[in-house]
Amino acid sequence: MIGFAAETIFTVMKIHYKNSGFEKYLVSVNLIAATVAVATFVSLYGFDKPLLPIWILHLVQFAMLAIFVGEKVIRFFNAVSKREYLRVNWFEVPLLAVFMLSFFASGHWFSFLDPAAGRMLSLGVYLILQVVAKACHGCVELAASGENPAKALIGIFLTLIVVGASLLCLPKSYVNEPTSPVDALFTATSATCVTGLIVEDTGSHFSFMGQVVILALIQLGGLGIVIFGAVLALLLGQALSVRESVAMQDLLSAQTLGRIGNIIGFIFVTTILLEAFGALGLMGMWPADYLVADKWFHSIFHSISAFCNAGFSLHKDSLVGFGGKWQVYGVISTLIILGGLGFGVLYNIAVVTVDWVKRHCRKRGDFHDIITKQAPRKISLQTKLVLSTSAILIVLGAVVLLLLENNSIGSHKSQAGGGQRVLSAVFQSVTTRTAGFNSVDISRMSPASKQLMMAMMFIGGSPGSTAGGIKTVTLAVILMVAYATLRKRSEVDVFKRSVSVAVAGRAITVVLLFALVFLIMSFALSITERASGFMMSDIMFETMSALGTVGLSCGITAELTTAGKLLIIATMLIGRLGPLTLLAAMTFNLKPAGYSYPEEPIIVG
């Protein structure tokens, strides 16, 4: 019944065209026009001097405008139902009208600019909005193509990385020395995979434009550009098709198809609000000699980096210099934890909270409750596992770090008190599993502490979040499988609920694949870096940090060879997508066996 209702809702806005074959040509023309439009912006703003005369580039932009408008007119007349086309693309006419008004009234709207510059600004904004809308919607359609969703997701990530690396190579993206292609690729991968490992200092090497590119990659890579496309479609009033909704369901780990729109809207609103509040909370953390604009940009950058669990900082020592600031523990830690819980968990908590408030605001025995007889919303098993496992890991990690470290934890000059040492340990326990910020010098920590941190990076955050690792729920299921075996129980249960054999098998597979990738990449790095003199423990730490998309380092990242950097790039990509996603991409067309063999006992252990 739910599936039928969802299909009815999601397909009601489907546009049918008279000549469906002509649509393929329009898609190709759109792709070429969008690429040319992007190339004009790169030529105008990516170099010290435009590659072509400015009047030629502006003429090309007007030609792209004509193509975009012409494409909409052709589709309008090609649509079977004109009313249906206008209803789905209702925003196009107002957007074009605003552009025309701003274009011809630029002297009044943009009084601080030359009229010609104001007109080109209007044109540029309109073209950018068109390109972004087409790119996001194209990503959603690609993910929902049905041929191989895993390959589509990998292709989208690779495209985003290549585009980001190309932008970071532009002269306007760096300050002094040019960024090499390998370093640009490394930085773009680290940002898109929300890892935080760097080969060039983000704050001093990259210009404001380069930092904005990195920030955009963090936001798009952390939340997923496919989800952004779905958000854009919903904001513009366009319903998702059934196939697109199923694709979103897989990406969001949602259990009900009919709630996809609500979850996507919740993700968008929650992300904006949390990052905005985080930026406001961080405003007072920066030195007094910073300009107001610099404080705002630093606050926004670190807020997005923390919520997306990216670990990128505009300071060479990450947050070591701010170890005594309350914002590190009260704002950044909170953003890291919320970003690492997963949107499914946050959505479940929000729904249960709203339902509880509504019920307690009504009088007992309310007529509406008697008629509907709706049971109270409950915390799901997924949420219980995520919250309990995350809390245990945070507390346990902080306690062990306090026991192992005497000098590194709380070494900041303002951290003399025991309370500050506890806060530093808690912060390092939080950030080690997911984000990669550090308020202490990792290189000064003991080998035992580094081993502990590697284990925490291996576990990572929670499913459906921006964090990496095998995930907290996977760890919980593995422990419950071991516990059930010791109790000689045939079923795995947790919180008085049974866990299926398929879920247990998936958890074991994830752990084995992560361990296998870690061993292979560590071994390969030990070969490529054998002449560098790095300790094997530092190489393993670097590999685990990349695989867990954490970003902590013992200081060897920038000194890696080109081959070593490429290996870390591959490791970060595998860690962000997940080995299981890559395996699914390779085995998508394999059909399950329709037979089974007789059982025979074997001895293990």
Image (cartoon, rainbow, N blue to C red):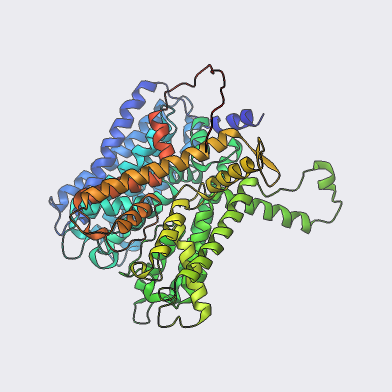
Vertical comparison of 360 with 582: above or below: below
Q: Name the residue: 34% across, 77% down.
A: 291
The quadrant in which the N terminus is found is: top right
Above or below, 394 against 379 in this view is below
Q: In this rendering, would 202 be left or right of 89?
A: left
Looking at the image, which residue is at 53% across and 18% down? 597
Query: In the shown orientation, is residue 191 left or right of residue 204?
Result: right
Q: Nearer the viewer, residue 253 or 493?
A: 493
With respect to residue 131, does 460 lie above or below? Answer: below
As rendered, which of 393 and 150 lies closer to the eye? 393
Answer whether residue 168 is visible to the viewer in this image. yes
Residue 594: image location, x then y, percent: 52, 17
Nearer the observer, 131 or 469: 469
**Residue nearest the observer in this picture, 9 or 208:** 208
Q: Position of residue 378 (x, y in %)?
A: 70, 48
Q: Residue furthest right?
A: 365
Image coordinates of residue 132 in percent, x first then y, are 36, 46
Q: Can residue 278 be seen?
A: no
